[in-house]
Amino acid sequence: MTITLQNQDPEIYKSLQAETLRQEEELELIASENYASQAVMEATGSVLMNKYSEGYPGKRYYAGQVNIDIVENLAISRAQELFWAEYVNVQPLSWSPANLAVYLGLLRPGDTVLGMSLDQGWHLSHGHPLNFSWLLYTIRSYGVDRVTEMIDMDEVERIAIETKPRMIIAGFSAYSRNIDWKRFRHISDTVGAYLMGDISHISGLIAGKVLENPIPYCDVVTTTTHKTLRGPRGAIIMAKEALGPKIARAVFPGVQWGPHENLIAAKAVAFKEALEPSFQKYAKQVIENAQTLARTLALEGLRVVSGGTDNHLILLDVFGSFGITGKEAETALESIGISTNKNMIPFDSRKPLDPSGIRIGTPAITTRGMKAPEMEMLGHIIIRTLKNRENIDKLQLIRSEVKKLCAQFPLYKNIHE
Ligand SMILES: Cc1ncc(COP(=O)(O)O)c(C=O)c1O
């Protein structure tokens, strides 16, 4: 009998099958998620995971690296082509260690880092009280304007001059507007700071050439590879050539040892996919879908933070609009087969675990092939769910509509055939 996961470990196999079905039959609106291709998943599950390859191509500690070096060099050169980057490190196991490596490579403990305030769109790993960044560095923050709910660059400049940071971070988890990279560069030069862009959320849209590329303006740019970029879980660091050696040493041996070459191969596959013209069409559709969905929701009375979106994500003030907390909205939507996440909105008076907002995004549903008509349908589904969240019969009916919609846009069809 051939040994398969199914007969070797039926419990894990069962959960895996159930999750495949859940992804197939439900809608993924979490802005940081996507569906990787079969090719990306094949590379992730490949024999490359068996190999230890500490070091870098041509300079490894163990023997037997001939194929590994080819894979890693391909990942590097494809990322360079995709983002026009000078130096690329494809080894970070995920974004958090990539961030740790940047701090370690470019800063000294105690240095000041300036980034967006946590409750207004920054990621917790940039400077949360329980994160290493907060413990080892001096974290200062800028925010959005109370009225426009967009970043006020004059305010960023004022705070930068006041706090004299060694590094400024521009990069967000819940900010839906374009970033003024040029002005960030100007401010960084004014105060003598490094500029780091965290493009984790938008890197697929930059690769797809529908958002401005920050590489020419930043000293260092980090990104996850699994969000809009549609690759495997992981991250990369891109930097000016001169900073390459510092970043390389900080990643290895500074932060981590054996790189996950199976995931590096999967990153290379994703970069190849993103270099195709079809990926540019995908990226354009992601933004069009987000704008159609935001418009539909706003017309139905749901307040969109900052009045709209320039990228793939939409922040919704469900508490201000319908008196429902973010947690209640997330639970109601989950009950009909739509995944979202509760999220703070700017100047939120509520707490992080039960805030006023939810964050939604279109990368995953666009990968499924959905377009404007489905976005309008989805907008109505979301509104009906929130308004009828205590009516079990109505929720059941809506759940069957979601399932029907999913069936029209099959995901991993061949897994079930
Ligand atoms: C802007 C941003 N940076 C970094 C991360 C963290 O990435 P990872 O989970 O790979 O550490 C996220 C996660 O959602 C994010 O939104």
Image (tube, helix red, strand yellow):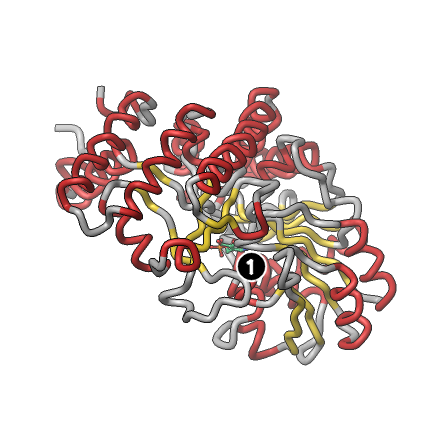
Residue at the (79%, 62%) spot, across then down: 154
Q: Amino acid at mark 1?
A: Gly
Residue at the (87%, 64%) spot, across then down: 190
Structural crowding at the residue carrying mark 1, measured as other residues with C-alpha within 10 Å and reported as few (<14), some (14–19) or many (≥20): many
Q: Is residue 246 left or right of residue 131?
A: right
Q: In which quadrant will I find the N terminus?
A: top left
How many badges with numbers are in the image?
A: 1
Q: In which quadrant will I find the C terminus?
A: top left
Q: Can residue 236 be spotted in the picture?
A: no
Q: Nearer the viewer, residue 231 or 267?
A: 231
Q: Position of residue 291 (x, y in %)?
A: 54, 35
Residue at the (54%, 67%) spot, across then down: 347
Q: Nearer the viewer, residue 111 or 184?
A: 184
Q: Nearer the viewer, residue 233 or 158?
A: 158
Q: Is residue 363 above or below residue 53?
A: above
In the image as oriented, which residue stretches furthest toward the right?
190
Q: Is residue 137 above or below residue 305?
A: below
Q: Is residue 312 above or below residue 375?
A: below
Is ligand 1 within 8 Å of the beta carbon of the residue shown at mark 1? no
Q: Can residue 191 be spotted in the picture?
A: yes
In the picture, residue 5 is in which quadrant?
top left
Q: Position of residue 203 (x, y in %)?
A: 60, 41
Q: Position of residue 391 (x, y in %)?
A: 17, 47
Mark 1 lies on a secondary structure that is loop
Q: Position of residue 283 (x, y in %)?
A: 57, 30
Q: Which residue is mark 1?
A: 121
Residue at the (24%, 38%) spot, across then down: 22
